Image (cartoon, rainbow, N blue to C red):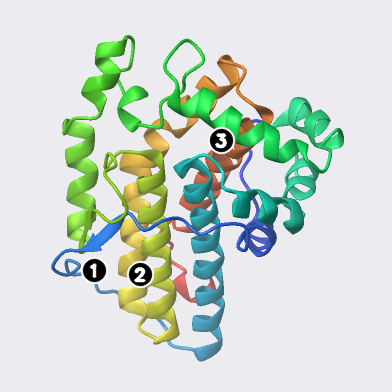
Amino acid sequence: MGSPLASLARDDVFELAAVLSGVARVRRRFLPFGSAGPAPTRSIPSGRERFGRERTTALARAELYNFLAASFAEPPSAAYLDGLQQSGAIPLLTAKGFGGEDFRLWAETLGPHRIGQDLPQAYSQVFIRPGPQHAPLLATAYLPTGWSNEGAEAAALSHGPAAEAVEAAYVDAGLVVGGDGPIAPQHLTVELQFMHHCAACEAAAWGNEDAPLARGWQDRQREFLARHLQRWSVAFARRLALIGAHPYYRALADLTVRFLEADSLELAPSDLLSVR
């Protein structure tokens, strides 16, 4: 795995989003619930051109969150594998150094049929089958209480503190976990999809030239990153490296960690809002 502290530049996010956006769409995991709580109001300088730049950035971020959520959601479908092969995503990820040497070597030897053989099996082995090569996709496995035995993993599916905390954030944004089948609220896919939803709402607010509402959605994202996703994503990536998971999924974990770090910087409040 590449260094988890090496953030992406904004241009990297745009480039990755452009290539990866057509690969997959995540199945909807949320249902509306009431309405989003009130957003903080800030005084934001107006400017149609500036709103357009902010909207473009939010859309790119939303696309990248969507791709990551879809990639970790389930074993890759034929459509996902075809989109990944046709998009040029793998050469781009290797060119930017994600996943390290193992991923580069795998990509260099990738034949026309190998991706369809490797990735579904790799997903099942790492994320579904129990055993020493298992890396749970649940926040509870990597938070201070930890995951050290089979009973603890079963408990991680229940509504403990981690699940209750993220559910509170979802409800405050006017959502509840639902949609396509049962899934734990603290599942990596759900947390990433929540960030996708908030970034898309931010983009819509910028499109309507509603800067205070857009900043409110940014505040939600910044808080969710700090309180939830960033608290366990590095440990998840380290787990994949420790068990020798497939290079593709190690590269995705590397991308996730570095993107979250870059996004937290992108969303950081500034006293110079007019020049962002």
Distance from label 3 to label 2 (Cα)? Answer: 28 Å
Q: Determine which residue is flagged by label 1.
A: 40
Q: Left of 121 or right of it: where is 34?
A: left
The numbered mark at residue 62 is none
Q: Which is nearer the eye, 133 or 169? A: 133
Circle 2 crowding by C-alpha within 10 Å: few under 14, some 14–19, many from 20 = many
88, 17: nearer the viewer? 88
Viewer-nearest of discs 1 and 3? 3
Question: Helix or strand or loop: what does disc 3 sit on?
Answer: helix
Q: Secondary structure at mark 2?
A: helix
The correct choice, above or below, for 140 with respect to 82 in the image is above
Q: What label sits on residue 215 in the rendered view?
A: 2
Do we see residue 208 in this rendering?
yes
Rendered position, 120 above or below 61: above
Return the residue at label 3.
253
Residue visible at 54% across and 32% down in the picture: 123
Q: Nearer the viewer, residue 12 or 100?
A: 100
The answer to whether 201 appears left or right of 21 in the picture is left
Mark 2–mark 1 Cα distance, whole angstroms, equals 8 Å
Q: Give how far across and how far down residue 148 sits, in percent.
A: 33, 10
Q: Amino acid at mark 3?
A: Ala
Q: Residues within 10 Å of mark 1 (few under 14, many from 20)?
A: few
14 shown above or below 255: below
Give the quarter of the image for residue 119. Answer: top right
Give the image quarter of residue 10. Answer: bottom right
Dot 2 or dot 1, earlier in sequence? 1
First-in-chain label (3 vs 2): 2
